[in-house]
Structure formats: C-alpha cells, structure tokens
Image: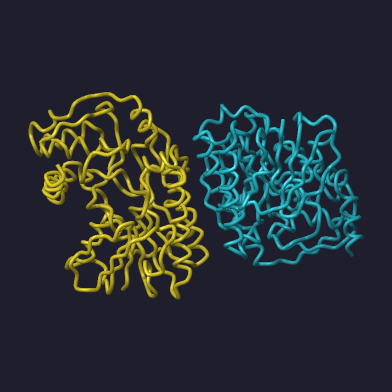
Chain colours: A cyan, B yellow
Amino acid sequence: MKVSILGAGGFLGQKLAARLAAPGAPIAVSALTLFDLAAPPVPEANFPVHALAGDVADLPAAAIPPDTAIVFHLAAVVSAAAEADYELGRRVNLRGVDAVIDAVRRLPRPPRVVFTSSVASFSGGQAASLGDDARQLPANSYGVQKAIGELLLMDASRRGFCDAVSLRLPTIVVRPGRPNRAASSFVSSIVREPLLELPTDLPVGDDFTVWIASPRRCIDWLLHAAAMDTAPLGLDRSLNLPGISASVADLLGALEAVRPGAAALVRRLPDPAIAAIVGSWVPAFDATRARAAGFAPHEPVIDLVRAFIADDLEATRRDRAATA
Amino acid sequence: MKVSILGAGGFLGQKLAARLAAPGAPIAVSALTLFDLAAPPVPEANFPVHALAGDVADLPAAAIPPDTAIVFHLAAVVSAAAEADYELGRRVNLRGVDAVIDAVRRLPRPPRVVFTSSVASFSGGQAASLGDDARQLPANSYGVQKAIGELLLMDASRRGFCDAVSLRLPTIVVRPGRPNRAASSFVSSIVREPLLELPTDLPVGDDFTVWIASPRRCIDWLLHAAAMDTAPLGLDRSLNLPGISASVADLLGALEAVRPGAAALVRRLPDPAIAAIVGSWVPAFDATRARAAGFAPHEPVIDLVRAFIADDLEATRRDRAATA
C-alpha cells in the first residue's frame, strides 16, 4: 500500500521511514512519500521512495498521492517554538491539520491518518493521574493546537473524510540530538549527555516525575495505529498511550545501573522558570483504552536507556563530532 | 465603555443590543458597534451606535474599534448549516474566532471577549449528567468548532491577547421566529407554534429531556460574563451555565398551564432521523462553577413560557402575518 509521512525529516519521521523500509516491516508498503520543510533523507528500500519539500499548511497534492492508504501526520512546530511564535504555531499545527484533511477528502478512498498529539495537551500538575476521559486543558499553545488537531480529525473521521487515530505521545526519552530550548529538554539530557561523557544540568528536583516513552516504542505505536481496527474507537479517535511514569531519580538510577558513575555528570541547578512550566505536567495516565486496543505496554526504564545506547548513541556521538 | 457585538443581527444579538441601549443597562456603554453579514438593526440609544456589514472571517478593523472594552462574539453558522457545509462552518466558526483574536491582539488594552459556545459541544446521550470538568466529545461539526473556539480563546487569554469568557449556552427555548432545519427546532416549536394557534409536530417521545434556557436568561448571562471578575477562572475560561433540565412533558405541561388546550396542537410524529441526532444530547449539567461565579440560576419552565409571551409572542405573530 502507499504510505505518506508528513514531517518525515524529524527524528521520529526518519526512524519511521527507516522501519517501513527495513525487511520485516509490519506494513506491506508499495510506495513511500516523505514530506518535510526540506526534502527528507531517503532510506534504502525495495519500493519507490519519493522525497518532497514544502509547507504543510500549503500541502502539495504530491505529498499524499492518489490511492494513499496511510498518512502519518507528524509535521509540527514544537512547544517552545509555538509558544514563541503564535502565528507560526497556528500555521503549521492548525492549518497543517486542515490541509491534511482537505487533501484526504479529495481521495477516492478515505485513508487512515495517524496523527501525533501529545500529553502536553493536558495540564493538572504533578499530583494528577488522568483517566482516558480526562479533559484537555492545555497550559501552552502547542498543547492547545494538538487538542484542536484531535478535534478536527475526530470530526473528519465522523464525516468520512478519513479514518483517523490521534496518539497522545508521552515525553520521548531518550531523544537523540542536542539539548534544545524545550522545557522538557533536560529529561533526555540527563541520560544522553552523561552517556556521551558530557556534563548536564538538572533544573528540577529528583522527585520530578514525567510520563515517558522511548522512540522505539513510539514507532511501534505509530505502526499499530496505522493497522488497527478503528471501529471499536467509535467517535473518540484519541488515545492516551501506555507509557511509563518515571521520576528523575528513576532515570538516574537506570543510567547509573547501565553506566556506573555516569550520573555524577548531572549537576543540580534549579531553574524556577523551567520548574514553573513543567510543574503543570501530568506524570501518570491510565491508558486503559489504548491497552485494550492492543498498544504494547512500555519496557522498564532501564531498557529505555539500553534502547538509546543500541539505537542512537553512536550516531549522536558522530553527529556531535561532525558539527563540533 | 465601547462595546462591539459580532453577530448582532441574530435574535440573541438584537436582544443584547436592545438591552444595552435601554435605560438601566448594567454596562455603561459609550459607543456600540453592531456587526453582522448584513448591517444589523440599530436600536435607539443615548450613545452612538454603528452598524456594519461584513464577513467575520475577514473582520474589518472598524468592527472592533480602538479602546473597545467588551466584544460579544455571537457570530456563527448554526449546527444544521455547519453540518451541511463543512467549509462554511470552518470559515465562520473557526476562522471567525481567529479573526477576533487577531483583531483584539492589536488593541492597546486586551478587551473582555464573551464567546457563545454551546452544549452541542458535548455528547453522551440522555442518560448522562455532566460535571464541570466533563470532556467535550462533540458529535457534530458545529460542536467541534465551538469546542475549538473555546480552546483558542483560552490560549489567547493565557497569552494576554484578550480576557475571554466562553459560555456554553443551553438549547434556547422559546426561540422566536419560525421552525427551521435545526434538529433542535421542535423544542421551541412545541411551545411557540401552539401559542400562535398553529399545529406542530413532535418527533421524539414525551420523556425526551433537554438542557434549556430562555433568551432572557441568556442575555443576563452574557451581561454577567462581560462584567465578571475572571481571575478566579484561571486557565479555564469556559462555563457550563445553570440552565434547567426539562422534558417534552414538562414543556407541554407548562404550555397547558399557561394556555389550556394549546398542547392539543402538538402532533406526535416520531422521526427516527431527528431522534438519532438529539439522542446524543446531554440533558443535565452541574454548572457548579458558573453558579459560584454569580451566574443567575434559571427560572422554572412555566416562567420561560411566560417570558416568551411577554417578550416575543406579538412580534413573532406580526412577522408571520407580514411574511405569510
């Protein structure tokens, strides 16, 4: 079947494309279209792969060719950028979803659309634990835009324009790459940087707890969402996923178990501005509905550290060396 | 203070403008701007009133003049029209809210924005009774667009672009005017038409129950929302209002008490299509938060019938005679 990945240049998009192109992929792909602001890297595959550059809010028809069966819509402006630039967030995160809906409406058969929403669409703070029917009351523009994207795709599914599944991804840990401006940056940095033998700062207390998932498990979930039976979902196309609740102490404990001494590279440097932002984050979700729908439960924290070492550590080290 | 009403040509908008222009209005208006697709009727007032025509999604700057303190945003495509024409609903109900946000962002002082959302943004069916934190899972495009409007205005308030209050209005009973294509049309028709000595059809059972409010009480609530202290609302700018839960039997009982014999003009004519749509409606809401914020509780059902007779019956009769 024909598959499109919008936002295929991001780290999840690249991993997803690589997984679809690798032997034994769970989806029988006949052609793959990769779309992003810059033409995404093309993995080696035994089917045609087209890379295309453009603006998702002004989506070219070629990004979702006729007979496309699955659209992965990962293209987004991330939280710090959406907060800094309201128009940019609205354009990419809202008009982008409208553009995807308008594109799939024109197709003769409504495709599956797998949309990456986020737990950032919730607020409630460290003491909260949210059930599947919890209300989304986002404390940031990115979360608002993701909650709106879910509503638009729910309505588009009800109207028969597409067959959508929206996955509220947990905070992804360990993200490859560099520390960035995102308030959540430290959650990955405190594992990744010490594994690169680099010091890093911890802006919150060791008891700060976050709902996380590994990139590897997120890819599993995206693939499951692409193939699952959506009939049992009914009107509600959004899913809280079975991530894990991990404290900073849990993450550092796992790091120390895998690489003894590494946690000493983490410096406690409280940052009230970051603490204020991440203080609204919810550390625990039920995810009963996603489990019932067959989404794989998460591996333990220590496996998530091992997954980074197996999947991304060497590439990250090479990138750092190349751009140092 | 300067006040704008967007959607001032609708029946609520006209009533609101008349109330603001009448002696003893609870808001000290210095100038009133009325905006709608066609220039709205101008009430007699002891301050300047400007009537302006245009498209809310392409809002002219004059619709919200500099130094405007209060914007009532009532402009909307109603539920049946938003369901029949997806682009029209998106343009008016979504881009309209974006246009209002963009207009108020340019003002030197962020105004109060009072937005009319709807209980149509909820689903759950006749057995449901929803608390203030219930999730909005709309079963129609109009409800989706209203839920999105709330999210956009919540975010705009958090960012300091405006100071918004979104009121999820109950089904308004008794609406003046004629029966229309809305699935909810019968809820008003079964009271209004018999009072005009006209027969009307009841498409659901007598036990069908709906969350209602009178036009008069809705105007009270809009005015309260314009003047209230929003600080206690925090992030969440949306309110379920203290309407009343009334069954068809309650409405017909009140009609019969006020005008004996009138209920005999209501013909039972079950309509499965309408029953299917309205079956998702929720008949009961807590509205604890709105009560605590000073929104007046609703009058009993019989007073709602009397309010229609006092406020709208003769005008409705005249309109019917004029256009018969």
Residue sitting at x 10%, y 39%? B258
Q: Nearer the viewer, residue A187 or A58?
A: A58
Q: Quadrant of the N terminus of chain A?
A: top right
Residue displayed at 27% across by 53% down: B12
Residue reaching furthest to the left: B260
Drawn side of residue B247 relative to residue A189, left or right: left
In the drawing, does residue A156 fall left or right of residue B85? right
- Number of numbered discs on residues: 0
Which of the 4 quarters of the picture holds residue B128?
Answer: top left
Residue B50 in picture, x, y percent from top left: 28, 69
Question: In the rendered image, which quarter is residue B173 located in?
Answer: top left
Q: Residue A172 vs residue B158: left or right?
A: right
Residue B73 versus residue A257 in the image, above or below: below
Image point (41%, 39%), residue name = B84
Residue B217: where, in percent of width, then height?
Answer: 24, 52
Q: Quadrant of residue A113?
A: top right
| Residue B211: percent from left, percent from top | 31, 40
Residue drawn where x is 63% and y is 29% of the image: A293
Residue nearer the viewer, A198 or A261: A198
**Of the pair B278 and A260, the residue shown nearer to us:** B278
Q: Quick check: B286 left or right of A15?
A: left
Q: Quadrant of the C terminus of chain A?
A: bottom right
